[in-house]
Image: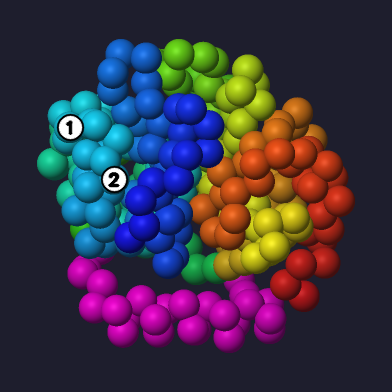
Amino acid sequence: MDAPTEITPTVWQLPFPVGHVYLVALPDDGYALVDTGIPGSAPAVLDALAALGGRPEQLRQIVLTHCHVDHMGSAADLAAATGARVLAGALDAPYIRGTAPEPTPVLTPAERSLHEGVMADLAASGMPALRPAEVDTVLHDGDTLDGWGEPVRVLHVPGHTPGGIALHLPESRLLFPGDLIATAPDGRHAVLGPFNVAREEAVASFRRLAALDVDTVCVPHGVPLRTGAREVLAAATPESDWR
């Protein structure tokens, strides 16, 4: 894995082939992690934390935007290695804990071949088996996260999964959208993330996020939007993506 990429003075992207992860510096000399990568990613995440000068015990929070394998895949290993609390949307918590089967996405024809390719690549990579993770705190729309040094609003954004969440930092004008928003390789176009369980809900959630006053969008797939994100999101056409 490449070295962490600074997005802001307190946010770094850990780029992975599938599902980027973000580290956030907290004011108490700790760190929060947004998503965890596929199973087997914990050593790379801990190496990235060390590259920033952090120790495993300084990881305080693991926030999971949703239940998919490239987001929750290393949560159990990282929680065990660091003692961090795991936070996730209330409706996705049973899937993360392994007490309910994850809902199957409803794929458009354009998504089907992409989904098959992604899953085949993950299988060929020798990815370890997914381990369920305990969710210490369930999150709902309108909740706020403690310890981040500025207000962090939790937004329930269903559609990609039933209990997906986004994190909005109004003072920093920064957004962690989960998989609702992805970007094209040029980094100048935003698209609806594929593989949704309820497409119309996902489009509505995309539009909710696009209406926020943000400059920076830390997407899990694609290139982060570093400036002018509001204009990029306003120009997006999620209704027609992946048709």
| Residue type for callout 1 | Arg
| Picture residue at 48% right of the left edge, 27% below the top | 9
Q: Position of residue 68 (x, y in %)?
A: 42, 58
Predominant SS of the magenta segment = helix
How would you rate the neighbour count of disc 1 (Cα within 10 Å): few for under 14, some for 14-19, many for 20 or more? some
**Residue on which the image places disc 2:** 48
Q: Secondary structure at mark 2?
A: helix
Circle number at residue 138: none
Q: Nearer the viewer, residue 180 or 189?
A: 189
Quadrant where the N terminus sits is bottom left
Image coordinates of residue 37 in percent, x first then y, are 35, 56
Magenta-colored stretch includes residue 124: yes
- N-term-proximal mark, 1 vs 2: 2
Of the pair 176 and 106, the residue shown nearer to us = 176
Task: Report the quarter where the C terminus lies.
Answer: bottom right
Query: Which corner quadrant of the image does residue 236 belong to?
Result: bottom right
Q: In the image, is 174 to the left or to the right of 83?
A: right
Q: Residue at x 13, y 42 (%)?
A: 80
Q: Residue at x 17, y 35 (%)?
A: 56
